[in-house]
């Protein structure tokens, strides 16, 4: 289960576990991927690259693994 995996990871951080043990747990929330589209990456002498070209999602950080 997700909660079990979270607890396993948390065991590696005992001071953090002390601070959050007993706090109310809320359901998981997530969003993404958020798409960003660019019609043209080249216009005259201008070339969009990286985030500006839409290759890596600038809001959610998707693609960080590409680095």
Image (cartoon, rainbow, N blue to C red):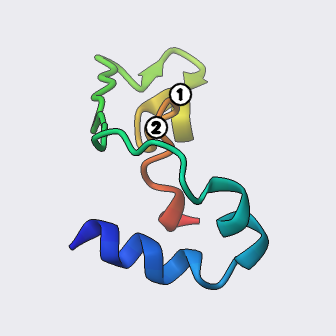
Disc 1 and disc 2: Cα gap in Å?
A: 14 Å
Which circle's residue, 1 or 2, is located before the other in the chain?
1
Is residue 28 among the parts visible in the rendering? Answer: yes
Counting other residues with Cα less than 10 Å from the Cα at mark 1, is it few (<14), some (14-19), or many (20 or more)?
A: some
Q: Nearer the viewer, residue 63 or 55?
A: 63
Residue at 28% x, 41% y: name it: 27
Give coordinates of residue 47: x percent, y percent: 55, 28
Q: Evaluate whether residue 49 shows in this view.
A: no
- Mark 1, residue position: 52
Position in image of residue 20 (x %, y %): 63, 55
- Depth check, mark 1 against mark 2: the one in front is 2
Looking at the picture, tell me which residue is in the foreground, 20 or 57: 20
Does dot 1 land on a helix, a strand or a loop? helix
Residue 13 as seen in the image, left or right of residue 62: right
Residue 63, percent from left and from top: 44, 54
Question: At 59% across and 83% down in the image, what residue appears?
Answer: 11
Label of residue 13 in the image: none
Residue where numbered disc 2 is placed: 60
**Above or below, comparing residue 10 to residue 67 in the picture:** below
Q: Residues within 10 Å of mark 2 (few under 14, many from 20)?
A: few
In the rendered image, the vertical position of residue 48 relative to residue 50, given as above or below: above
């Amino acid at each position: 289960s997700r909660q079990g995996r979270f607890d396993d990871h948390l065991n590696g951080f005992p001071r953090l576990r002390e601070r959050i043990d007993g706090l109310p747990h809320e359901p998981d929330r997530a969003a993404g991927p958020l798409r960003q589209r660019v019609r043209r990456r080249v216009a005259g002498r201008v070339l969009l690259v990286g985030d500006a070209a839409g290759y890596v999602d600038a809001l959610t950080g998707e693609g960080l693994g590409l680095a």
